[in-house]
Image (cartoon, rainbow, N blue to C red):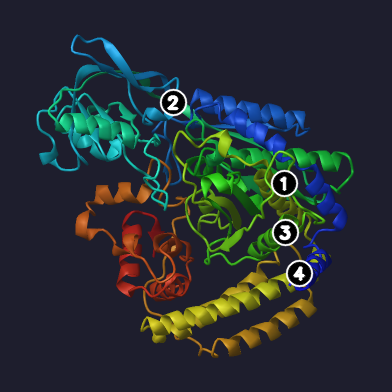
Amino acid sequence: MRLLAALALSLTTTAATADPLPFLTDKEVSALATEISGETAKRSVEGFSRHHRMRGSRGYRAAADQIVAELRRYGLNDAHVESLPADGKIFYGTQRSRPAWNAELAELWELDADGARVKRLASWEATPIALAQDSWSGEANTALVDVGDGLQAEDYRDVAGKLVLTSSQPGQIASLAIGRFKAAGILSYAQNQRTAWYGEDETLVRWGHLETFAPESERTFAFMLSLQAARALQGRLARGETVRLHAVVRAGQEPGSYDLAMATIRGSELPDEEIVYSCHLDHPRPGANDNASGCAAILEVARTLSKLVAEKRIAPPRRTIRFVWPPEIEGTIALLNARPDLAGRARAVIHMDMVGGDAEITKAVFRVTRSPKSLPTFVNDVAEAFGRFANAQSDLYASTRSAPYPLVDPEGGKRALQADFVDFTEGSDHQVWTEGSWRVPAIYLNDWPDRYIHTHHDSIANIDATKLLRAAFLGAAGAYYLADLGADDVPALWQVVRRHALERGADLLARQERLRAAGQAGEIANLSRFHLAYEQAVLDSIAPFAEVPAAVRQDAGRLLASLRTLAGDPPAPGRASGTVYRRNAELKGPMEGFGYEYLEDKMTGLGITGPARPALLGYEGLWGASYPYEALNLVDGRRTVGEIRDALAAIYGPVPLEQVSGFLEVLERAGVLRR
């Protein structure tokens, strides 16, 4: 057995070391792998996590200034903060700008019968996440009332002038608790982010929110309590005990700005074409993995690439590489609307949101997430190739302590990366870049799930320097390759795309079987047609980067013919019925921003509520649920409603035509689409 194990290990080691490096030369991979420092990135995470980084806040600006100072020290002399006004009135496409929010003081104390303070329940200074975002100044010295979820009027009895305890998010109950029943303030123990570890740690204080644009009559403050603290209070109230509290808050909104740190490494030959690094800088303190980790990782990439180019260890990139640190989603929507030239120059985006969590602690899986199916791109294959390389090298090192590129930091762990490669999911700024207004391919590097996300335990203690190094390596290698991609690189690129296309063919067969099992065999031809068109579009997506040689196109033709046979040679479709829509070119951005949802606002104004709401908003298919996002993305001025429905059915699973047409009709009424 020992001999067989040794032989197997030898074969594994030989195969891994013999595999060709993906795209880059050994010299380039070595330069990146040896220069990137997870330790340096982790120190940046620690620095960012000292700030409570709400949009427009003083803490956010301090972190942005810290980034700019570091960038200039690294030699990126154009580093600056791009400030876009945000006052609650200005719109950037579909995003209503949110005014800055700052807090100076927030304390919650329990009082004894004589009114003396006996126990501090919450403190802004110690744990700023304990104050719900968008709280307003106020003070109360009063009793506490438990209102349960507080979502029905009957939950409120004798609450005027008192503090209310709720299991709901503060913003969900403010209209009833404050606006209608005149409570003095809110205490919430809302449990967000439901994962397998949900409710496991009852000491966690979770991030809470009040509505940014609440009417003045509903403005209030809210404190967030742990489940443990809330249950203790509930037990006392249930026994008939009076709980008196003193709450004081000094906080509020004011006109401010979206402050985006930015810098570039200028391209040597194609400076007007850009590869963009994105993350999001805002989040409550500490917010270490979410998302100080992504911000620190791209800062380390900036340091590494700038240093390697300056030392002539790698050639300058042909295309410009841009680094952007925005507030999540809303900042990116604002930037792309305010600076359309940036979107026009962007060829691809690498977005990092939560990339540093120690999986032993956070229980997260590191994911390389593809662009949506409505945006076919070879960029997915590039990211996946580098991800597989990092998986193989880190696994080889973990198994044998010997690998050409172990990608291990001296202060970090040694376990294998085990990155997973997954289809598009929403949830961060990548969805803004890939949205139909801009259609820039984006790779999303992210940890999910993370049991400490949006809590006061999302701390530097959970961060692994090795994980940061590997994320930075993937980002640096992928972007450097894309920035340098030329016609000579296309044959080798095609071989990788070709292998991945065959794997996607296997996935197609699995989906066909799923349709048969679900009694939807009639959808198989539609699925197959979409798949073949997608593969052709992936090949075509290379052309904006480099000319595709005739030999590659011929080989691609043979591959597509083979895939057609594999797919069952679906017949050509007839023209699907329905209206043809196009986007309103003057209104750019997704329907869901951050702190403001354009479509929800418009539907409220149009009286589209309750049963009249489009059913597609909550529809879940056989293998996905982002139907509304992709439905809008598929609107291109050429597809009919029926063809959009067929594409959605291929992407996520069969969906009724009337749900798609109803959703698009609402978008037309909201001014998003035109016939």
Q: As shown in the figure, which amino acid type bears the numbered disc 3?
A: Ser
The residue that label 4 is drawn on is: 2
The quadrant in which the N terminus is found is bottom right
Q: Which mark is residue 399?
A: 3
| Mark 3 vs 2: CB contact within 8 A | no
Q: Earlier in the sequence, mark 2 or mark 1?
A: 2
Q: Nearer the viewer, mark 1 or mark 4?
A: 4
The residue that label 1 is drawn on is: 321
Identity of the residue furthest to the right in this view: 312
CA neighbours of label 1 inside 10 A, class few (<14), some (14 to 19), many (20+): many
Depth check: give the residue in front, 619 or 156: 156
| Mark 2 vs 1: CB contact within 8 A | no
Q: Earlier in the sequence, mark 3 or mark 1?
A: 1
CA gap between label 2 and label 1 equals 37 Å
Q: Nearer the viewer, mark 2 or mark 1?
A: 2
Q: Nearer the viewer, mark 3 or mark 2?
A: 3
CA gap between label 4 and label 3 equals 15 Å
| Mark 2 vs 4: CB contact within 8 A | no
Q: Is residue 524 left or right of residue 470?
A: left
CA gap between label 1 and label 4 equals 50 Å
